[in-house]
Image: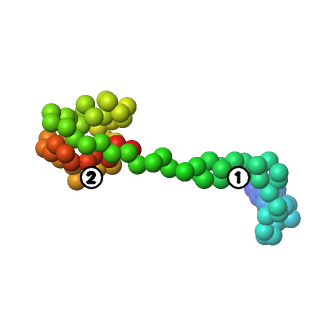
Amino acid sequence: MRYAAPAAFLILVTVIVLAVRSGVRSDAPPTKASPAVKRAEASSTATRAKPAPPKRWYVIQNGDTLGAIAARFGTTVDSLLRLNPGVVPTALTPGAHVRIR
C-alpha cells in the first residue's frame, strides 16, 4: 500500500502529459512564413546572386616565386595552389600562366 499512491500519481501525470501533448502537436504542414522570414530569405538570395569576380592571370617572369606572386597580388600561396592544381611551386616556368583570381 505504501507504493500504490505514488505509482497511481505517476500514472495519472503520465496520462495527462500524453493527452496535452497530443492536443498541442500538429501534423499539419507549416503555415506561410512570417514577413520577417521572407525578408531574411530575400536578402540571403540577393547575396548568393552576386557574380563571381573575373578570372585574372599572371605570366610568370624569370626569378618569380609563388610567394612573391602571392604578395604582389595580396593573396596566399595556398590560394594560388588551389587555383592552379598542376603548378609545382619549386619548378615555375617563365612564360607560363598562373591564375591569381
Rendering quarter of residue 20: bottom right
Q: Is residue 1 visible?
A: no
> Which residue does the image show at 25% across and 33% down from the upper left?
67
Q: Is residue 5 left or right of residue 72?
A: right
> Which residue does the image show at 26% across and 48% down from the upper left?
97
Q: Is residue 52 left or right of residue 65?
A: right
Q: Is residue 53 above or below residue 64?
A: below
**Residue kind at label 1, given as amino acid type:** Glu
Q: Which mark is residue 85?
A: 2
- Relative depth, front residue between 61 and 47: 61
Q: Position of residue 82 (x, y in %)?
A: 32, 48
- Relative depth, front residue between 14 and 92: 92
**Count of numbered circles in the view:** 2
Q: Is residue 56 visible?
A: yes
- Relative depth, front residue between 70 and 26: 70
Disc nearer the start of the sequence (2/1): 1
Q: Position of residue 50 (x, y in %)?
A: 58, 49
| Residue at the spot of label 1 | 41
Which quadrant does the C terminus fall into?
A: top left
Q: Position of residue 95 (x, y in %)?
A: 19, 45
- Contact between labelled residues 1 and 2, with CB atoms less than 8 Å apart: no
